[in-house]
Amino acid sequence: MKQKKRVLVIGGAGFLGSHVADSLSEQGHEVTIYDMKKSRYLRKEQKQIIGDILDEAMINKALKGIQVVYHMAGISDIEESFQRPVDTVKFNILGTTIILEACLKNKIEKFLFASSAYVYSDSGSFYRISKQACELIIEGYAEKGNLPYVILRYGSLYGERADRRNSIFRMLEDALTTGKISYAGDGSEKREFIHVKDAADLSVEALQDRYNGQNLILTGVDSINYSELLKMLNEMMHGKLKIEFKKNKSKTHYALTPYSFNPKLGRKLVTNPHIDLGQGLLNMISQIHHDLHPELKDKFGLLVNEK
Ligand SMILES: NC(=O)c1ccc[n+]([C@@H]2O[C@H](COP(=O)([O-])OP(=O)(O)OC[C@H]3O[C@@H](n4cnc5c(N)ncnc54)[C@H](O)[C@@H]3O)[C@@H](O)[C@H]2O)c1
């Protein structure tokens, strides 16, 4: 699918959705964002509709004239989902079903869904359960009518526009504001972090027809454990960080791998070249520092207080 499309990015005001919207615009697609909150990142060439995914009439209206739908809205945080199972079912499962119903009715050419690398793990609690249910419901709709789809199973994302729900953001912000990082675990927990911009570019790549009906795994290229990651951050902070490993390990996150045996295979899609983890972290540190100190201006590579 190389032609320019009219695309609706549902959840496009969020962390991942806003970057996907950017990548789509950069490739010349006509982008409209559908989100319950106003996007801070809306570009001149993008439109936004403010609405809830549970509002069937609004969703149907928003889909008029749309060819491709990216669905990235709902409860996206594992801990929040653990605390709010009823809302997780409502927003993630019912919300997705309402969108799919509207996609069939409006003869959408392609539906792309933000799932998770957690989807067939034993961790992730109600969040994982909601993603499993959504994947099955998508398959059900594809069988019911003609709805080409791609399931995008994202791994651990990091990068600009994240907030405190994101583990890397929390660590970096704590490092910059308190000089201390408290980590719940022993540090052996492994992750394949992927920069959100790489994930967004791959999500646009997934528009190609050869990926129809596939489950694509979008995780980073290199695997790193939290001990190594924290060591790297400490080096970036000139060895001045205090790092504390707390014993109460997370009940909802996985240790070594998000994968457990399941016959439904996913194909890993990788970018080459990609944003290096160290470079990506430095950019994120610089953005958090800038947000914490808006009074400082960058002048020829030096931070200057103009007041
Ligand atoms: N961030 C990650 O590391 C990660 C990893 C794997 C999968 N995902 C998935 O990617 C998607 C996007 O994640 P994110 O990190 O950008 O989350 P996010 O919370 O930043 O973005 C979600 C967006 O959905 C909107 N939204 C929520 N409920 C809505 C509703 N009822 N109606 C309309 N809009 C609503 C929010 O306002 C928000 O802008 C989610 O489905 C998430 O599960 C994220």
Image: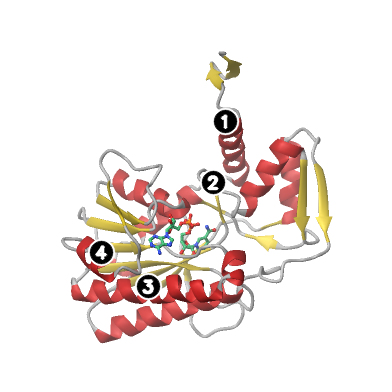
Judge depth for marks 2 and 1 and give the one in front: 1
Q: Are marks 3 and 4 in contact (CB under 8 Å)?
A: no
294 vs 280, nearest the viewer: 294
Q: Amino acid at mark 2?
A: Gly
Q: Using the image, tell me which numbered label, if any, was put on residue 290.
A: 1
Residue 224 figure quarter? bottom right
Q: Which residue is mark 3?
A: 96
User: Which residue: 56% across, 35% down?
Assistant: 287
In primary-sequence order, the first of circles 1 and 3 is 3
Q: Amino acid at mark 4?
A: Met
Q: Are marks 1 and 3 in contact (CB under 8 Å)?
A: no
**Mark 2–mark 4 distance (CA, rounded to whole Å):** 31 Å
Location of the N terminus by quadrant is bottom left
In primary-sequence order, the first of circles 1 and 4 is 4
Residue 266 versus residue 219 in the image, above or below: below
Q: Amino acid at mark 3?
A: Thr
Q: Using the image, tell me which numbered label, if any, was put on residue 45.
A: none
User: Which residue: 62% across, 47% down?
Assistant: 169
244 vs 256, nearest the viewer: 244
Q: Which residue is mark 4?
A: 58
